[in-house]
Image (cartoon, rainbow, N blue to C red):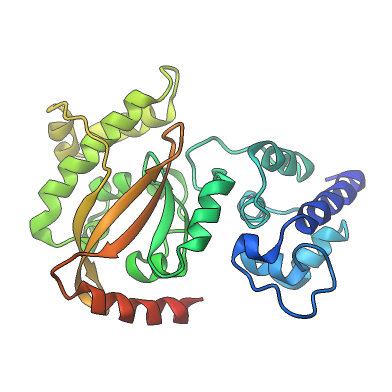
Amino acid sequence: MSSAKYTELGAFLRSRRARIRPADVGLPHGPRRRVPGLRRDEVAQLAGASVDYYNELERGAGSQPSEQMIAALARALRLTGDERDYLYHLADRPVPARGGPASHVHPGMLDLLGRLTSTPAQVITDLHVTLVQNPLAVALLGDQSGLRGARASFVHRWFTDPDARLLYPEADHEGQSRAFVADLRAAAARRDAKDTEAASMIDSLLGTSAEFAALWADHDVAFRRDDRKRLNHPSLGLIEVNCLNLFSEDGRQRLLWFTPAVGTDSAGLFDLLAVLGTQKV
């Protein structure tokens, strides 16, 4: 990175930080706030960066931020798509392809996610790549960040990694497999005909999973909208949940949130889950 870009990067981060109110990102205003918008330490906390590192970025110094850090900063600062792309430009990093784990999350979805503080929630792509989770979602489903390439998609892991299936009781595996394949076919059909991301994933699974190939041949098509699921939790045991979906306008992203299933003891387990989520913050 050139010194001019470092300087502009710092100025851009400061300008975006100054426009955000703490309440916009779920933080208390506090009685002695001396600066407009967020403080540097608050942005660092939201982005999962050290305060010293973020301070260096705003000063136009420090090491070149990674693509993952840029994505985290874009989410923390509620950048628009154009602003996010500009941030990648200033950092001399290529703008990632849509659909990967560094995909830009729409600020409106991030706002909704931030307001869902009492229930597990996360934003995923139409190919089931997890983009961001709240603490309760991490407590319920495990931390799904840090995965790259094909493994970032839970659907891909479902058909290629036996450990991915530990999340569901074995009796539910066949139904989950069918639902994942039907959902993937619907997602692929909704994409542009020139799209290669979904097609590449489908070709990979057809070549590596006989189960996927057999189900794909059935030509079932159905988006997963509202599900009732049974989940295996390593500490709390079996939890039965309702999984609700909110789709973005283009269908590329979904906000998922989980509620305890009526008529089960899952409500009490959710209370315990909240304790685990607090411990993971």
| Residue ID at (14%, 62%) | 169
Give residue 110's position: percent from left, percent from top.
Answer: 54, 53
Query: Closest to the observer: 52 or 19?
Result: 19
* Res 207 quadrant in image: top left
| Residue ID at (13%, 69%) | 263
Query: Closest to the observer: 203 or 76?
Result: 76
| Residue ID at (37%, 40%) | 127
Give residue 278's position: percent from left, percent from top.
Answer: 46, 79
Number of numbered markers: 0
Query: Closest to the observer: 92 or 131?
Result: 131
**Residue 201 visible at all:** yes
Q: Does residue 7 lie above or below 133 as drawn?
A: above
Question: Which residue is the extreme one toward the top?
Answer: 193
Give residue 154's position: percent from left, percent from top.
Answer: 33, 49
Question: Which residue is the extreme one toward the front?
Answer: 31
* Res 136 quadrant in image: bottom left
Give residue 65's position: percent from left, percent from top.
Answer: 72, 54
Instruction: Give left or right: position of 217 versus 78.
Output: left
**Residue 48 visible at all:** no
Query: Closest to the observer: 41 or 214?
Result: 41
Instruction: Give left or right: position of 94 versus 245.
Output: right
Please identify the quadrant where the N terminus is shown: top right
| Residue ID at (45%, 63%) | 116
* Res 86 quadrant in image: top right
Instruction: Give left or right: position of 125 versus 211.
Output: right
